[in-house]
Image (tube, coloured by chain):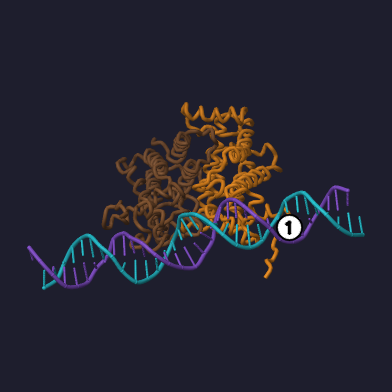
Chain colours: A brown, B orange, C cyan, D purple
Amino acid sequence: MPRQKMITPHGNLEQAVKETAWKQIAEFGAAALSLRAIARELGITAPAIYKYYPNRDALVTALIVDAFTSFGEAQAQSIASLPQTAHAQRLMTLGLAYHQWAMQYPERYHLIFGTPIAGYSAPAEITMPAAACSLDVLVNTLASAQTAGLLNMGSIPAMTAEVQSMLQTWQNSAAPHVHIEVLFLALTVWARVHGLVSLQTGNQFPLFITNPGAIYRRELERIVNETIQLKN
Amino acid sequence: MPRQKMITPHGNLEQAVKETAWKQIAEFGAAALSLRAIARELGITAPAIYKYYPNRDALVTALIVDAFTSFGEAQAQSIASLPQTAHAQRLMTLGLAYHQWAMQYPERYHLIFGTPIAGYSAPAEITMPAAACSLDVLVNTLASAQTAGLLNMGSIPAMTAEVQSMLQTWQNSAAPHVHIEVLFLALTVWARVHGLVSLQTGNQFPLFITNPGAIYRRELERIVNETIQLKN
DNA sequence: TGTACATCAGTGAACGCGCGTTCACTGATGTAC
DNA sequence: TGTACATCAGTGAACGCGCGTTCACTGATGTAC
């Protein structure tokens, strides 16, 4: 009985492997990702995958890079058509896009922002630029609000020397024209949003919270209101 | 060559298995937890574990319950000796204890609040009460501030009917005397704190943030200031 | 104090399984002449 | 238009491994008389 040919020939296999990998990560988790299982589902033999990825970890790394790219693009696109001066709207839209991307691709979200896969450590020189990039859109949005004098920095507590120096390092190496208060706000806005989203994707809310998305929207409004001042 | 006896006899094995399991989860992740590996490290044979746990998942469930208990106790104890009326101090202390517990037991933190283990789903009737309980201390702290008229609820956006009804369900079944605004605040304070903590335990901050704990402390101050009003 | 016996924690062999990775190979494709 | 040849994507067998779980068992312990 000849093996049925299930894949389109020639090179599309590299893409097909990644797509199947995502499917399996969604079902069994990234730690259980198996080249043999991917090959089985694609109707090829496992060694064929080695023509495209030297080993299992290389595939995981490729998936992580793709996830960061997809995330960054979703962030940038969400506000692309909004006027530069609609600061509150831009922040709100970014936050909604963050949530929506995570809901649409929970496996991708978990892979880049969830519990790290033990026994695998992503090569920092590959993932770190992607990670830093993904915060850029948020930083820029807050920075332009600050330039317009509409960023509410009153609630930021006095920073210790240590915090200041960390933020300055960041400022020097990635965002020379952005005030460190803006960087602090970006970090905390990100963390606040991430907290709710990761509780939701992980199903860790109390049972009664049947629609975490609705809670998210309220909290996002609160964050935007606390962060961006109304125009006067 | 006789096998060396490495464990204390009689019943302590149940505890020893859990301790070794935590060690291995820290190193290899919960998804890779292996009864054979635990047995190997303890100097016993794998089937011996079946005298205490009917299968692998039962062990994981026991670990999760333990983690929730440890977490809940750490929360309760942290504020046990503080005066009931020191609302801001109590919230601050709770937040610091949350962070400290997560740093001390990152594996436990990941197991109960991290990315769920794919292929394993905890029996809800066991973990859900524990999970709900673990929020209780926070809810009570905020509720007593609210009773004293010191909870800042001004920043809470108007709630949609849907959000109100979810919170009312929660209120009815678990916290009958607590206003739903307090429940909303508890949820969001938890999520904000969780966001920073999970980014830190997952090493997901930008490289420049060499001491995420310092950022956490600033942000926690900000949360407390926004949540609890100063006495007048 | 001494013996027979029940208990039961832990053993060791075995089961069937899936895994990552290697290696020599095949056979379709496309090019050079 | 036809033939010889190189390329290289994918094959299939094999490696050594660790896993969860089962089962009949052993041998130390403690109790009953």
Q: Residues within 10 Å of mark 1 (few under 14, many from 20)?
A: few
Question: Is B104 left or right of A198, judged from the image as shown?
Answer: right
Residue sitting nearer the eye, B142 or B56? B56
Quarter of the image with the N terminus of chain B is bottom right
Which chain contains the residue that carries disc 1?
B
Q: Residue at x 29, y 53 (%)?
A: A5
When asked about the image quadrant of residue B104, the answer is: bottom right
- Find numbered disc 1 in the image and state the secondary structure of the residue it sits on: loop
Name the residue carrying label 1. B9
Expressed as whole percent of the image width and height from the top left, the position of residue A64 reads: 40, 54
Question: Is B50 left or right of A208, judged from the image as shown?
Answer: right
Residue sitting nearer the eye, B232 or B37? B37
Expressed as whole percent of the image width and height from the top left, the position of residue B217 reads: 56, 49
Question: Is A176 left or right of B158, judged from the image as shown?
Answer: left
- Is any atom of residue A167 visible in this view? yes
Number of marks: 1
Quarter of the image with the C terminus of chain B is top right
- Is any atom of residue A176 visible in this view? no
Residue sitting nearer the eye, A75 or A18? A18
When asked about the image quadrant of residue A57, the answer is: bottom left
Expressed as whole percent of the image width and height from the top left, the position of residue A214 reads: 46, 33
Expressed as whole percent of the image width and height from the top left, the position of residue B58 reads: 60, 47
Q: Amino acid at mark 1?
A: Pro
